[in-house]
Amino acid sequence: MNIKLKVLFVITLIYLTFGQVYGTTAEGILIDWSDKPYLIDKEGDGSKIDDLVKVSWYPDVVADKLYFRLTRSSLNSANRSWKAYIDINSEGNFFYIDIRSNPNSGKADIAIYNEAWVLLWKTTGYWCDSYNSELYIPMSYIANVSEAGYGFEIYVRTDSDKAPDVGPIIISTISTYPTITLFIVFIIVIAGSLSRRKGI
Amino acid sequence: MMILLVIWIIALIFLNKLNLKFFKFVLGSLGTFIFLIHYTNDILRENILKVLAFVLNLIGGFITNFEVFPEYGMLTVTRTTEVITFFLDYECTGILEIMVYISLVAFYPIRGPLSKIYYMITGIVYITAVNLLRVMIIVFIIQGMGMKYFFFAHTVIARLIFFIFVVTLYYRTFTLEHIVQQKVGVL
């Protein structure tokens, strides 16, 4: 068999193997958090009410939602209301998210403010229990997600704790920056084609 | 779009009859790129993303503090207390580079149809592999040097390496191939 045919055959087999692997499910209070990114924060470095121990996040561009789940220490009072804040630096534009969770009612109030502390958006839902608060914010409020190449720095905190303790959580795309590459290859190909035409 | 497709095909037949090879190449490549974007963009992107995520997931098993969420096209790199989540979107899959490459190969006068298919498929594999290398370079730089080097890793080092490899592919396929063919008197 021709070597090219062999290569084509092997590549086709690999592609067909990879092609049917994944499926998506999303259920839970807001979404299923079992397979989402998270970080663990040290327990005991905050007050008894709002010691953060885990933060999860998930950007869903299609649904235009940036989801968060904040977990506070289970060593603390299960019924005390607590506040958390998420500060977002979206390429120099700052947004502040205010989360107020009431475990007694199960209600979480979410509000987004801009740099000038003007209220941009707010919502309320039954998204918290004794130790967890879930929320989402519309991604389009904080970035132009219809364009590639966006990124956020996220700082999650309460009145007494931060998660992570140092530095941000970063969510970013990693573009290949195709425009410049394609411009250069366009010149290469046209030059090649013209030299072929002229017989150079 | 169907009307445009028909007009494009008629124009190509017309240019072929007039033996205007260069214009046939330009119009053919441009049209193929536009129709590929329109008709196969989502399928191709989704599948390239699956392959990228699958391979990264395999690699992730050998690297600590590197987690892949294949069904969401996300990667997470942790360093001490800092965390970064990469979201593989449209421009991260190398889909535009792949589509342009396919479009050009389809109409560039290189050997026969089997060679074209060979070049197309190996080109897709090559660009995807280089993209994987690019992502891993970003991951290793962040893990080794810290989050503050993310911008440097992503927009300078990884970008430069990807650029060099992709330009090399185009040069190898479209320029060097042509020179070799001329030297051996194929054309």
Image (cartoon, rainbow, N blue to C red):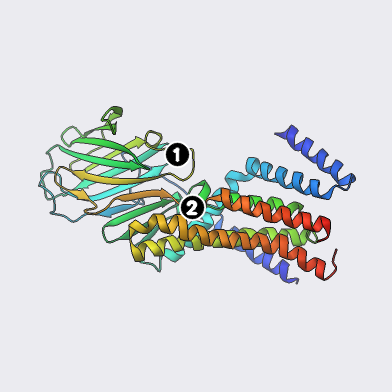
Which subunit holds the residue at mark 1?
A
For discs 2 and 1, the disc positioned in front in the rendered view: 1
Which residue bears the numbered disc 1?
A145
Which residue is under mark 2?
A22
Q: Is residue B118 visible?
A: no
Closer to us: A95 or A42: A95
> What amino acid is at disc 2?
Tyr
Between discs 2 and 1, the one toward the N terminus:
2
Q: Position of residue A142 (x, y in %)?
A: 37, 36
Report whether mark 2 lies on the same chain as mark 1.
yes
| Residue at (68% x, 42% y) in the render | B35
Element marked by disc 2: loop
The answer to whether residue A141 is above or below residue B186 is: above
Residue B84, disc: none
Residue A153 is left or right of residue B126, and the answer is left
Circle 1: residue type: Val
